[in-house]
Amino acid sequence: MFRLPEPAFRRKALVSAMMCATVPALAVAQENDPATLQVLEVSAERGQTPSEFTESYAPEATTTSLKMELSHRETPQAVTVVTRKQMDDFARNDINDVLEGTTGVTVESVETDRTYYTSRGFDINNFQYDGVGLPAVYDNVQGELDTAFFDRVEVLRGANGLMTGSGNPAATVNFIRKRPTADTNASVAVTAGSWDKKRIVGDVSGSVSESGKVRGRVVAGYEDKDSYLDRYSNEKQMFYGVVEADLTDTTLLTLGHAIQSSDTDSPLWGALPLFYTDGTATDFARSTSTASDWSYWDNTQHNSFVELQQELAGGWRAKGTVFRLENDSESELFYQYGTPDPDTGEGLLAYPSQYDLNSEQWVVDAYATGPFDLANRTHELVVGASWSRSETVDESRYGQGIGDPLPPLNEWDGNYPRPTFDNGVAGSDWTDRETATYAAARWTLTDSLTAITGLRLTWLDNKGTSYGNSKETSYDAVETPYAGLIYDINDNHSVYASYTEIFSPQTELDINRDRLDPIDGVNYELGLKSEFREDRINTTVALFQVEQKNVAEAAGTYDDGTQDVYYRAVDGLESQGVELEIVGDVTDRIQLFAGYTFVDIEDADGNDAKSFVPEHLAQLRGIWKVPGVDGLELGSQIRWQSEISQEQGVATTGPNAGTTIVTEQDAYAVVDVMASYDFARNWNATLNVNNVTDEKYIESLKKFGASAQGFYGEPANASLTVSWVY
C-alpha cells in the first residue's frame, strides 16, 4: 500500500495564499485588457469541436474541473470522457451503460429503477450539466436517463468541490448537451432488439434564419421494451429543444428545454433474497422477479436552461446560466421481505406501498474567465458566484396486507390483489439553499511549469422535516481550497499533483432520520499524462489517496416497513489506489479505450471496508475499420471486475445457525461485440450483441442486512439499429 506525503502547508496558510493569489489578478487583468473586442462565431465553429463531429474516442478538452477549457495534460486530475462515437458504437443509450464503461466507476443497480454510482469507493452525488453543478438531493438516480440529448459525458474522478460545492472524493459526472449547428444536419435511428425492444430517435439541427444568427436543434425519441425479468416493461419518451441566437457579434443567448419520461410496469422494489435461513446462497432463474402484476414506477424529468455569454475585451468571457431541474416520481410498488426456507422456499412476506416524490432545483451561476499578464507571463483566471435552491416533497402511503405470507418465488406469478393504500402516511418536505463564490487561477510559472490555485466559499441553509424529524442545518462561509501543479517533461509527457479539501454535506439519514454531519477530509492525487500521435492518443497514470471523517455507512433498515436504509457516521475511512487509462486512435483503423483501477478501502482500524466495491476493475473496448471493405467496422468491449462480498446477517436454522452470512459474487467478465456497415450513402446498420458468453452475475451487493437483496444482470441479447444521417 502506498502513502502520499503529508502536505507541506497547513490549511489556513493555503487558503490565505490562494486569496492573495487570485483576487488581485482581477485588477491586473483589467490593466492589460486591449481595447478591441473579439468576434463571437456561430456555435459550429466556436470553441472545441463537439465530439459527434470528430468521430473519435479521444476528446479535445474538458470543462468539468474548472470553467476553463483544459486539455488532457492541462487538467491535474484523472478525467474520462465518453464521446458520442463510443456511445453510438456500443448502443450506450442510458447513463448506466455509459458509466459502466468508465474507468473506476461501478454502477450499483440495487433495483431495476434505482441506481447508485461509486468511484474510488465512494458514492457519486456530484452531477453537472454543461459545467453547472447540481446540489445533491438524494444519493441515487431513479428511472433511466437517456443519452440521446448528450454530445459526451465527462467524468472527473476525485474531489471537485471548487466548482460543484460538494467536495465529494468519488467523481463528478458532467453531461455535455448537444448544441445547434450552423449547417443543416439531420438523423433518424431505428432500433429493434431482444425482448421486443423498439426505439426511434430523430435529431434535426441548423440555422433558422437566413443570416445564420439564430440556430436551433430538436432531438426526440421513443423507446418501448420488455425484459428478461418476468412482467417487467419500460416505456421512454424524450424531447429536447434548444435555440441559440447571436444578439450581437459578441453576445450569445441560448434557451433550452428537455423532458423525459421513464414509465415502468412491474419494477423491482427491493429484489431477490440472496440467502436462505440456514445461510446458504439462493440461486434463482435470472428471470425471477418479486414484482406484482399491478405495480408501476413512473419517473418524469423536466430540464430547462437559459444561458447568456458575452465576449469581453482582452480575450475575456462572461457567462451566466439559470438552470431548473424537476423530477417527478409516482409509484405503486410491491416489496417482498423476509428470508426463505431452504427446503420449502416459504418465508417471504408482502409489503405493498404507494410512493410519490417531487424535487425541484433552481441553479443560478455566473462567472468570468480570461487571461492576464503578470511578471512577463500570461496566466488565466476564473471568478464566479452561484446560488441554488432545492425543494423536495415525498409521501409514502402504506397498503393493506403488509405481512401477508407469499408463495415461494419459483411459484410466484405476480398475482396479488392490489390493496387500498390507507394503512398509514408518512413523508418529507424540506428545502436546501446554497450560496457560493469561487475563484481559480492558472499560473504559468515557467515554460514547463503550471500551477492552479482556487478557493470556494459556501453558505448552506437547510430547513424542513423528513418523516417527522427536523432536517435543519446551517453552515457559513465554508472554505474549500484547491491546488494543482503540472510539469511538462517534454512535448508528450506531463506529471501532475493536486490537493483539495473535502467538505460534503450528506443527504443520508441516521436511525432517527436526522441528517448526518458533513464529510470532511483531504484528497491527494499524483499522476503522469501523455499524448501520442499528434494528440490522437491520451494516456493517464494516476495515484490517489483519500482521507475522510464522518463518512456515511449503511447501518440497517428502518423498522417502519419502508426498507429505506439508515446510516451511521464512520471516522477514519481511507481509500487509495491507482488508475490507468488509454484512449484514442491507436492506428488509422483502430480506436481504443482501456481503463484499469485498483482501489483499497480501509477503516480507522486498518480493516477492509466496503467489500461490495471491486478491488480491481477493468474496461476495454475498441473498433477496427476493416481494410478492403469501405464502411465496415468490427468491435468488442469487455468489462471485468474482481470478486465482491457483503456481510448479510446471521443464519437462523441448520448447522450454521448463529454464524454470519457472507454473500459472494465471484470475479466475472461481460463481453459485447458489434458490427457496423455503411450499406448505402447516408445509411448505416449496426448490430450489437451483449453478454455473448451469457455470464450470470449479481448486479450489486450494496444492500445488506434486512434489505440484503439483489438481482441478476441481463443474459445474452442483441439489437439492430438502422440509421439515416444527412
Image (cartoon, rainbow, N blue to C red):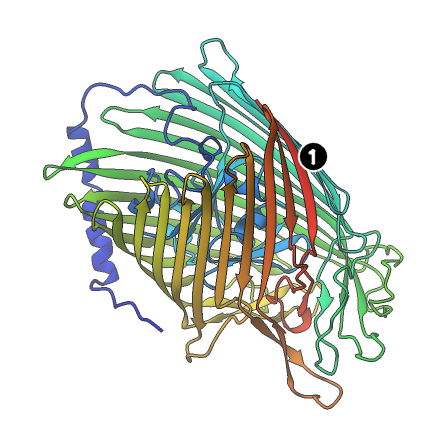
Q: In this rendered view, identify the residue nearer to me: 353 or 169.
A: 169
The percent position of residue 529, horizontal first and vertical second, equals 31, 51
Residue 649, image quadrant? bottom right
* Residue 677 against residue 72 in the figure, above or below: above
Is residue 616 among what the camera can see? yes
Q: Residue at x 21, y 36 (%)?
A: 26
The percent position of residue 613, horizontal first and vertical second, equals 52, 66
The percent position of residue 698, horizontal first and vertical second, equals 65, 64
Q: In this rendered view, identify the residue nearer to me: 471 or 695.
A: 695
Q: In this rendered view, identify the residue nearer to me: 342 or 196.
A: 196
What secondary structure is marked by label 1? strand
Residue placed farthest to the top in the image? 210
Residue placed farthest to the front in the image? 628
Q: In this rendered view, identify the residue nearer to me: 610 or 430.
A: 610
Q: Residue at x 62, y 65 (%)?
A: 565
Horizontal relation, residue 570 to residue 277: left or right: left
Tell me if mark 1 has few (under 14), some (14-19) or many (20+) residues whose alpha carbon lies within 10 angstroms of its own.
some
Horizontal relation, residue 266 to residue 685: left or right: right
Q: Which residue is mark 1?
A: 222
Placement of the N terminus among the 4 image quadrants: bottom left
* Residue 672 against residue 201 in the figure, above or below: below
Horizontal relation, residue 444 to residue 496: left or right: left
The residue type indicated by label 1 comes to: Tyr
Residue placed farthest to the bottom in the image? 655
Residue 402, image quadrant? bottom right
* Residue 568 against residue 84 in the figure, above or below: below
